[in-house]
Amino acid sequence: MKTYLFHFHEMESANSNILSIQTEKLTKRFGDFTAVNAITLDVKKGEIFGFLGANGAGKTTAMRMLCGLSTPTAGKAVIAGYDVYKGTEQIKKRIGYMSQKFSLYEDLTILENVSFFGGIYGMSSAQLKSKSEALITQLGLENETKKLVGSLPLGWKQKLAFSVAVLHQPEIVFLDEPTGGVDPVTRRQFWDLIYDASDAGITVFVTTHYLDEAEYCNRISIMVDGSIAALDTPSNLKKKFSTESMDDVFYELARGAKRSGD
Amino acid sequence: MGTSFSIPNSQFSIQANSLTKWYGKEKAVAVNEVSFKVENGEIFGLIGPDGAGKTSIFRMLTTLLLPDGGSASVSGFDVVKDYKQIRNTVGYMPGKFSLYPDLSVEENLHFFATVFNTTIETNYHLIKDIYVQIEPFKTRRAGKLSGGMKQKLALCCALIHKPTVLFLDEPTTGVDPVSRKEFWEMLKRLKKEGITILVATPYMDEANLCDRIALLQSGKVLTINSPATISASFPHPILKVKANKMSTVIKSLASLQGVISCHGFGEYAHVVVEKENDKIIDSIKEHLVAQKLQGIEVQKSEPTIEDVFISFSRNGISQ
């Protein structure tokens, strides 16, 4: 059964009455170290949510809890309608995930990777066939399907990894620094894919160190030392900090951080 | 080998002359006749995405890889003939963490000082600002450090013998904006000590922090100059445009008459136009109104290094 923590009455668009992610004072401690300290946030269906913070702020730990990979120490969270304590398996089926580090199997071809990941997510072979054809066409990879993924430029790999992560039409896709090191043109094409996914109703939860990309998000949060120090639309945050640039907002909040490193 | 590097040149710390490297049976070209010169005491940036050839250039200049064509010198020493002298005088921080994970912070630093016949005390002034930040963890094994601390230790180890030239291969990749800013402030202090710095980065905004840069893509140099000169050389006017739905702005303006290209740049889209005049501004506004967009803003804007890079990519030099 789907459960919801809160009731929301504000509706800005057709999708905004449904929440994909709700957390309340979500906390993770390792011994006496509080990696994630009582974070509360909610993300609407189809929203592009930027999850920012310095290295070591607790982003990865928070994301692991939201994906059902790490059990919280305290607090509540409902992801895609399922409780993070009891519904981890259901959560995993309803989300997609990609990171800069692990994306796809380099020794498999493009098509083999698509079939493999589609299969893991339980797609039927008929579904897989039509979906993978659409994916290949969207990325313009018709002539490359038999190429090993390892031979592709990083930008293509990342676009492909994203498309594979949303192949099973998850409710939410989690992206952990998806565009690090990618060239400027491909980085923008990547964001076109994100917009398309969002238009199709997929919620996008993304971390990035490129602050221009923070501007492409509907709302962003900035984590400092395990807590959420700010959460709003990019333009409201800039107003709040009386600045024109997102760099200033980030610098203002994060430079007081006591923790560093990953 | 074309130019002779047998006489050390006092003005340039690094000279690369048609440097070329290929890999594998198919001889895939990673570095394609790359030439540039770095003056003594300069911060010179190799700016380009993954696959541009930055790491191969670094490895050839630090004598870890033999060139397949061209020549290069560092501090007047030839990278092939005089590799021993080069290894004694340069500091190198590879993109991949390469210290001993089983040695402690302190032991790694001591090891590198000893290898170069010096002591931590002799050049402590060079690393002090950085080392104090990791000193609380000096007994921790390097393999157990966080990413940010590993990076700081690697820089200390690359500096401990007071190199004349410092090679930094993507020191800030995956590093958050605040730590990146601090890192660049550190580089400016090293420059004051007279150390020449060659630094690679995929972040276009860091280009402006270098004295001069080479833009690289797919193994080729696109252009070399000061960042300001490169930005100013952009051949077309740029307008920055904003409205309530940016994805629509970017998609719909790209095909408008008089518009060369349109790309997202944070809050605004940069619209490259053939001519900047009231006619094109009105035409953009009308077009966006017709798309039922609101909050429309159109202003003149200055080109950035990223605009220049995108324009090179669009003109077919890209992969």
Image (tube, coloured by chain):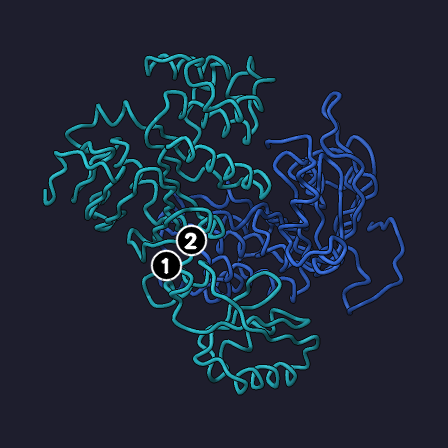
Q: Which residue is mark 1?
A: A144
Tell me, by letter, which chain the rendering colours cyan. B
Q: Residues within 10 Å of mark 1 (few under 14, many from 20)?
A: some
Question: In the image, what residue occupies the spot 34% across and 51% down?
Answer: B214
Q: Residues within 10 Å of mark 2 (few under 14, many from 20)?
A: many
Q: Are marks 2 and 1 in contact (CB under 8 Å)?
A: yes
In terms of sequence position, does the residue under pointer 2 or pointer 1 come before the other?
Answer: 2
**Residue B173: image location, x then y, percent:** 49, 41
Task: In the rendered structure, find residue A110 and report the number of the disc placed on it.
Answer: 2
Above or below, B174 relative to A123: above
- Amino acid type at mark 2: Ile
Above or below, A154 relative to A62: below
Which quarter of the figure has residue A255?
Answer: top right
Which quarter of the figure has residue B177?
Answer: top right
**Residue B93: image location, x then y, percent:** 40, 31
For the N terminus of chain B, the quadrant is top left
User: Looking at the image, which is closer to me, B242 or A262?
Assistant: B242
Question: In the image, what residue occupies the spot 25% across and 27% down?
Answer: B86
Colour of the chain lettered A = blue
- Amino acid type at mark 1: Glu
> Which element carries disc 2, helix, strand or loop?
helix
> Which element carries disc 1, helix, strand or loop?
loop
Above or below, B54 relative to B231: above
Provide the chain ID for the residue under circle 2.
Answer: A
User: Looking at the image, which is closer to me, A214 or B44?
Assistant: B44
Question: In the image, what residue occupies the spot 31% across and 38% down?
Answer: B40
Instruction: Tell whether B283 sits left or right of B197.
Output: right
**Residue A5: image location, x then y, percent:** 87, 48
